[in-house]
């Protein structure tokens, strides 16, 4: 048996109100996977994420390497649909390159900082994020930007053309 993916999303806040009330509800997901190398090593943080999930929704925090292995073995199990959360582009990239070949990626919110530029609403990228996103897109990933459900999807190609035309 294999799991069906409800949504794969990058959201630096991981489990928070909007994810729980909007995206989980709309996808009818029964299980959340937080795929994050740092969080996977922290049982206390994983427990906090579990407590923040709505009643009846299971949560598991795993590493990028583990996500690739388990996707290749049984596409992350039997509970479906599943909701995948990444904190940032590097974790999404490492999981993808480790064999978790999800077909679509929604970019929802990535905070700003030194060396980062706002590419759309609450989403900022640095050059390395753009390089990794472009590499996944060339491998067949459909990436789009949509912070909240009411926002129109904006494709990676459009963001790239505007902010990273030399990639």
Image: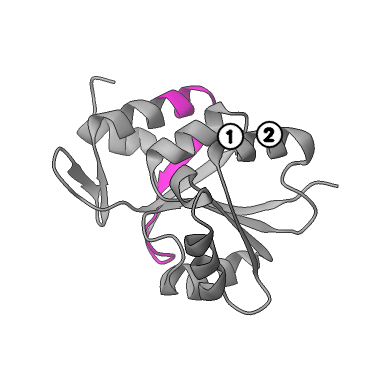
Q: Is residue 157 left or right of residue 80?
A: left
Q: Residue at x 71, y 39 (%)?
A: 70
Q: Is residue 16 left or right of residue 28?
A: left
User: Measured from the top left, where is residue 96 in percent x and y?
Assistant: 54, 32
Q: Is residue 167 above or below residue 51?
A: above
Highlighted magenta segment, given as a residue range: 135-151
- Rate crowding at label 1 as few (under 14), some (14 to 19) or many (20 or more) other CA atoms within 10 Å: many
117 vs 58: above or below: above
Q: CA distance from mark 1 to mark 2?
A: 6 Å
Camera-nearest residue between 9 and 65: 65
Q: In the image, what residue occupies the spot 38% across and 45% down?
A: 88
Give percent across and percent down for residue 83: 60, 57
Q: Extreme top residue here?
A: 166
| Residue bearing the label numbered 1 | 65
Q: Nearer the viewer, residue 107 or 162?
A: 107
What residue did someone put label 2 on? 69
Residue at figure coordinates x 72%, y 46% from the top left: 76
**Residue farthest to the right, as pictured:** 1
Magenta stretch: residue 64 in it? no
Colour mapping: one colour
Taking depth in this image into account, of 71 and 40 the one nearest to the observer is 40
The circle on residue 8 is none
Compared with 1, 60 (above or below) is: below
Q: Is residue 141 visible?
A: no
- Toward the left, the furthest residue is 114
Tag 1 secondary structure: helix
Q: Secondary structure at mark 2?
A: helix
Marks 1/2 in contact by CB < 8 Å: the verdict is yes
* Residue beneath the point at 58% across and 77% down: 54
């Amino acid at each position: 048996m294999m799991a069906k993916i409800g949504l794969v999303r990058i959201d630096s806040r991981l489990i928070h109100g909007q994810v729980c009330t909007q995206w989980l509800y709309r996808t009818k997901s029964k299980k959340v996977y937080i795929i994050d190398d740092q969080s996977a090593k922290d049982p206390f943080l994983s427990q906090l994420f579990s407590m923040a999930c709505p009643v009846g929704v299971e949560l598991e925090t795993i590493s990028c390497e583990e996500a690739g292995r388990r996707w290749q073995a049984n596409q992350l199990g039997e509970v479906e649909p599943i909701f995948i959360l990444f904190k940032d582009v590097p974790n999404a990239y490492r999981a993808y390159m480790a064999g978790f070949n999800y077909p679509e990626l929604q970019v929802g919110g990535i905070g700003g900082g030194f060396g980062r530029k706002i590419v759309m609403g609450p989403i900022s990228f640095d050059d390395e994020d753009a390089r990794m996103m472009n590499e996944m897109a060339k491998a067949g990933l459909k990436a789009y930007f949509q912070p909240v459900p009411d926002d129109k999807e904006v494709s990676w190609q459009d963001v790239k053309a505007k902010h990273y035309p030399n990639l």
